[in-house]
Image (cartoon, rainbow, N blue to C red):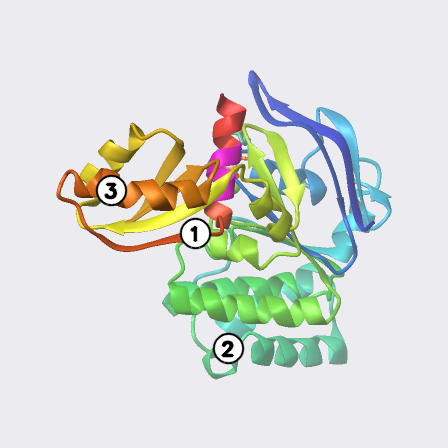
Amino acid sequence: MVIEAERLTRRFKDVEAVKELSLAVNAGEIFGLVGPDGAGKSTTIRLLSAIMDPSSGRAAVAGYDTVNQPEEIKRRIGYMAQRFNLYGDLTVWENLNFFADVFEVTGQERRQQIERLLGFARLSKFRDRRAMHLSGGMQKKLALACTLIHTPEIIFLDEPTTGVDPLSRREFWDILTDLHMQGITLVISTPYMDEAERCSRVGLMYKGRLVVCDTPEQIKRMTEGELVAIWPSQPRLARTILEGLAGVKEIQTYGEQLRLFADDADDLIRRVPEALSAHGITLQRISRTQPRMEEAFISLIRKQKG
Ligand SMILES: Nc1ncnc2c1ncn2[C@@H]1O[C@H](COP(=O)(O)OP(=O)(O)O)[C@@H](O)[C@H]1O
Ligand SMILES: [Mg+2]
């Protein structure tokens, strides 16, 4: 275990941002933290990065205690905050040098590391551009490069791709995959389900609690019942009608598609077309399907609420 947390709790006055969180992350994993705004993701990452002390409970990173040995931890980890601080007036190259100063990376090692990271982050051509004149996606890559300046074994990334265009997100993930291949342990928080799918394990947080923690495959299997996808001619009307149909447990809408949770998918596939055609609604398609990550999370959170 490179990261271990035991009943980690953090209070801010009357808010319990993280409640009794227990967790173990193996070396080389890409561990994803997902959950809605305010779930406690950033606080968890700060606690694990030894930036903030817990109110109770404990955590160890790389074998060191976050409260008693924070300096040992900081030397071995990289932490990219949700709102990281680059120096807008400084160039790409100057920013990297600034962080090299902070982490005391010097001499020949510094020069080589900066060249390597510029290439790695696909920023070599932009070395003399001021950070404030980079695109959002390039700023994130520069922040990641700065986070890697001291060659950390473990990196914590707090929503590194939020608000970044899809192409840059993909490129950012290519870089994360490279890091994963090098054996680096990654802990990343994200609101994006496609990113959660790319993690080796995912922890779903809700109101400070870790609701589930498992592989994406296992989490998808936790959705109860079977699933039928339909593409009706009038999705809204169809939804209203099907909400009253026996055997339909839950309906989720994705654009033109309705996804019906049922105890018996085959039974629904027989009855749904008829129920809808009685109201003049036709079906382009109807098929049994697998739950997606997003559906699994929505179901699990609804269960928590209920
Ligand atoms: N420094 C702080 N002071 C007071 N409340 C905070 C502080 N940081 C976080 N919180 C509160 O703790 C809860 C969890 O926040 P956070 O960890 O930022 O969640 P997330 O990153 O999942 O959006 C929220 O209710 C937030 O308002
Ligand atoms: Mg956050």
Circles 1 and 2: CB distance less than 8 Å?
no
Q: Which residue is mark 1?
A: 288
Q: Which residue is mark 3?
A: 274
Is 230 contained in the magenta span? no
Q: Earlier in the sequence, mark 3 or mark 1?
A: 3
Predominant SS along the magenta part:
helix
Q: Gap between marks 3 and 1, in whole Å?
A: 17 Å
Q: Position of residue 215 (x, y in %)?
A: 65, 50
> Which of pointers 3 and 1 indicates the residue nearer the eye?
3
Q: Position of residue 16 (x, y in %)?
A: 59, 22
Q: Gap between marks 2 and 3, in whole Å?
A: 58 Å
The answer to whether the beta carbon of the residue marked 2 is less than 8 Å from any atom of ligand 2 is no
Q: Earlier in the sequence, mark 1 or mark 2?
A: 2
Q: Is 119 or 182 nearer to us in this picture?
A: 182
**For the magenta stretch, what is the residue range?**
295-300
> Which of pointers 1 and 2 indicates the residue nearer the eye?
1
Q: Is residue 152 visible?
A: yes
Q: Is 2 or 141 nearer to us in this picture?
A: 2
> Which of pointers 2 and 3 indicates the residue nearer the eye?
3
Q: Which residue is mark 2?
A: 123
Quadrant of the image occupied by residue 60: top right
Q: Earlier in the sequence, mark 2 or mark 3?
A: 2
**Residue 116 marker:** none
Quadrant of the image occupied by residue 210: top right
Which residue is pictured at 36% across the width and 29% down the height? 246
